[in-house]
Amino acid sequence: MELRGERECRACGTRWSYYETEGVVCPDCGSLRSVAVDEGAVHTGGDADLDLSDARAAVDEEPLDRVATLAAEAARDYRRDVGFVSGGDLRPLPDEYLLAAEVEAVGSRLAREMQVTEAAEHYFLTLLRVPVDGERPGPDAVPAELRAERGLAVSRAVDAYRRDLRTYLADVDGDLATAFSAIRAHQKRVDALDGDVEPRTAERLVGAIRDVYAYLERDDEAALVRIEQRLPDTQ
């Protein structure tokens, strides 16, 4: 959608960006009387932080299914609030969003499991620590019993980004349209298998959608070639 992001308070004259606050209430005086003072721009969502602190705090106090539920809910809330086009500016797909999609998928799975393997529990707890400790686990770290959740998480993240891209772009044709088609076909294959693909196979989707960003934002012509190389089976 297009939103007019620059606002001015009629009560005190303060100006602020709706894209930053996502509100029409004046940040200085609290007045609801404000008006837009700029042209509209594509905006699909604002900034948000993936807050898994409640789930981490519950690890030593609550059963695993409760911790998993808390984590999945926090990840779902984050994904609901985040967009990839802010005030007309396209953003890259961040690892934080990929992590949130995986925490949601894995957490939802473990919350309903009667028995959870040690490997699955350890991996889930590792996911919870990523915002504190660093990088999202690579494909080789994914336990076999959770590879479907990894695949579905990647597919959902790529689909969300692809949808925002279609909102951001006025037209898609030529080589870019071919790249979009390859990404969509690969994603549909992952979905058809309920995410149960090799994690490295799923990860190629991440590289491909990030190549689209590189092509659009940095005029990286080689990015479209890289997409063909990443997804050769969808051509």
Image (cartoon, grey):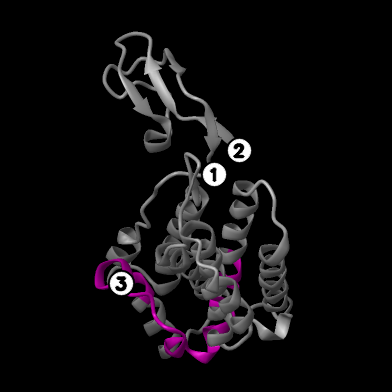
**Circle 1 residue:** 44
The verdict on residue 33 being magenta is no
Highlighted magenta segment, given as a residue range: 127-156
The verdict on residue 142 being magenta is yes
- Give the image quarter of residue 225: bottom right
- Give the image quarter of residue 118: bottom left
Numbered disc 2: secondary structure: loop
- The one nearer the camera, 125 or 63, is 125
Of mark 3 and mark 1, the one earlier in the sequence is 1
Residue at point 53%, 86% (across, down)? 200
Q: Position of residue 134 (x, y in %)?
A: 28, 73
Please tell me whether residue 33 is drawn above or below residue 87 in the rendered image: above
The 10 Å Cα crowd at callout 1, few under 14, some 14 to 19, many 20 or more, is many
Of mark 2 and mark 1, the one earlier in the sequence is 2
Amino acid tagged 2:
Met
**Circle 2 residue:** 1
Mark 2 and mark 1 residues within 8 Å of each other at the beta carbon = yes
Residue 108 can be seen in this image: no
Please tell me whether residue 130 is drawn above or below residue 12 in the rendered image: below
Amino acid tagged 1:
Thr
- The one nearer the camera, 1 or 197, is 1
Using the numbered discs, state the Cα–Cα distance from disc 2 to disc 1 in whole angstroms. Answer: 6 Å
Q: Quadrant of the C terminus?
A: bottom right
Residue 33 can be seen in this image: yes
The 10 Å Cα crowd at callout 2, few under 14, some 14 to 19, many 20 or more, is few
**Circle 3 residue:** 129
